[in-house]
Amino acid sequence: MLFHVRMDVDIPRDLDPEVRADTVAREKAYSQDLQRAGTWPHIWRIVGEYSNYSIFDVTDNDELHALLSGLPLFPYMTITVTPLATHPSDIAAG
């Protein structure tokens, strides 16, 4: 199943700098592992915001929830999820 996910990050300004750096580094490693696995095939930065649009390719809602809640930055995120379906006019869908 494909999902369009918007993630808006709001890390508290008073978070210890070392904790922040460690959390961001773990987030990058976690997200890149999912990208390499094909579970997170697309990620785009939203210009001017600490946000992204992503596409996830997972088995079901529960898998997506587990992946998103496992993000190290999850406690600092607002996440919007939109399930996607094949459009009948998509020539690539065959």
Image (spheres, rainbow, N blue to C red):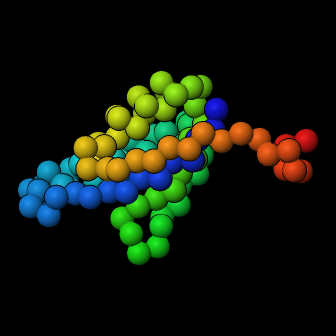
Observer-nearest of 14 and 24: 14
Reply above or below: 77 against 51: above
Residue at x 31%, y 43% (from the top left corner): 74
State whether residue 83 is above or below residue 5. above
- 33 and 80: which one is in front? 80
Q: From the top left corner, tell me how far across and down residue 53 is, in percent.
A: 51, 56
- The quarter in which the N terminus is drawn is top right
Residue at (48%, 64%) from the top-left corner? Answer: 45
Q: Is residue 12 left or right of residue 51?
A: left
Q: Is residue 13 left or right of residue 70?
A: left
Disc tally is 0
Q: Position of residue 50 (x, y in %)?
A: 36, 64
Give the quadrant of residue 59.
Answer: top right
Depth check, front residue: 83 or 56: 83
Q: Residue at x 49, y 32 (%)?
A: 64
Considering only vertical position in the picture, is 94 above or below 62? below
The answer to whether any part of residue 79 appears in the image is: yes
User: Which corner quadrant holds the C terminus?
Assistant: top right
Of 69 and 86, which appears nearest the observer? 86
Residue 82 percent coordinates (x, y): 56, 44
Residue 38 seen = no
Q: Residue furthest bottom?
A: 48
Q: Position of residue 42 (x, y in %)?
A: 58, 51
Instruction: Answer with left or right where residue 24 lies relative to residue 93.
Output: left
Q: Residue at x 39, y 41 (%)?
A: 30
Q: Quadrant of residue 17?
A: bottom left
